[in-house]
Image: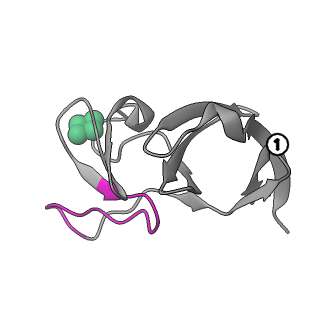
Amino acid sequence: MPELIKVASIDQLRPGQMLYVDVEGLPVALANVGGTVYAFGDSCRHAGGPLSSGALRDDVVTCPWHGWAFNVRTGKSVIPPVGLRIPTYQVQIVGDDVYVAIEWEA
Ligand code: FES
């Protein structure tokens, strides 16, 4: 069962912005797309670039290192090589707090 972990306050993340959070050692990026917050793995599938330092355009994040791009809702690559995916995590907003659901491996 996933563990809900508070990772940020909603006022740290305005629409169109991203935020890096360290979730107990797991690198996670948050993105606010039109008022909805999405969470995904911060490490790019190409060479580990920090996606939260890249560009967010609508629901697509572009890696700052070599330009690979992923949909923040689905985690799927939107440019070749297609079929790659970054992990995504469920987000819950409770009051002003942002929680991410993490399923830890046993
Ligand atoms: S590390 Fe992200 S595109 Fe190369």
Q: Is residue 67 magenta?
A: no
Residue at figure coordinates x 50%, y 47% from the top left: 31
Res. 104 visible in picture:
no
Three-letter residue code for mark 1: Lys
The front one of 95 and 38 is 95
Left or right: 40 as drawn, with respect to 95: left
Graded by Cα atoms within 10 Å as few (under 14), some (14 to 19) or many (20 or more), the crowding at tag 1 reads: some
Residue 106: x percent and y percent? Answer: 80, 58
Residue at figure coordinates x 73%, y 36% from the top left: 8
Residue 25: x percent and y percent? Answer: 69, 31
The front one of 39 and 11 is 11
Q: Bounds of the magenta span?
A: 70-82
Dividing the picture into quadrants, the one containing residue 47 is top left
Left or right: 105 as drawn, with respect to 84: right
The front one of 83 and 42 is 42
Look at the picture and state if 48 lies above or below 5. above
Dividing the picture into quadrants, the one containing residue 93 is bottom right
The front one of 62 and 12 is 12
Res. 43 visible in picture:
yes
**Which residue lies under the disc numbered 1?**
6
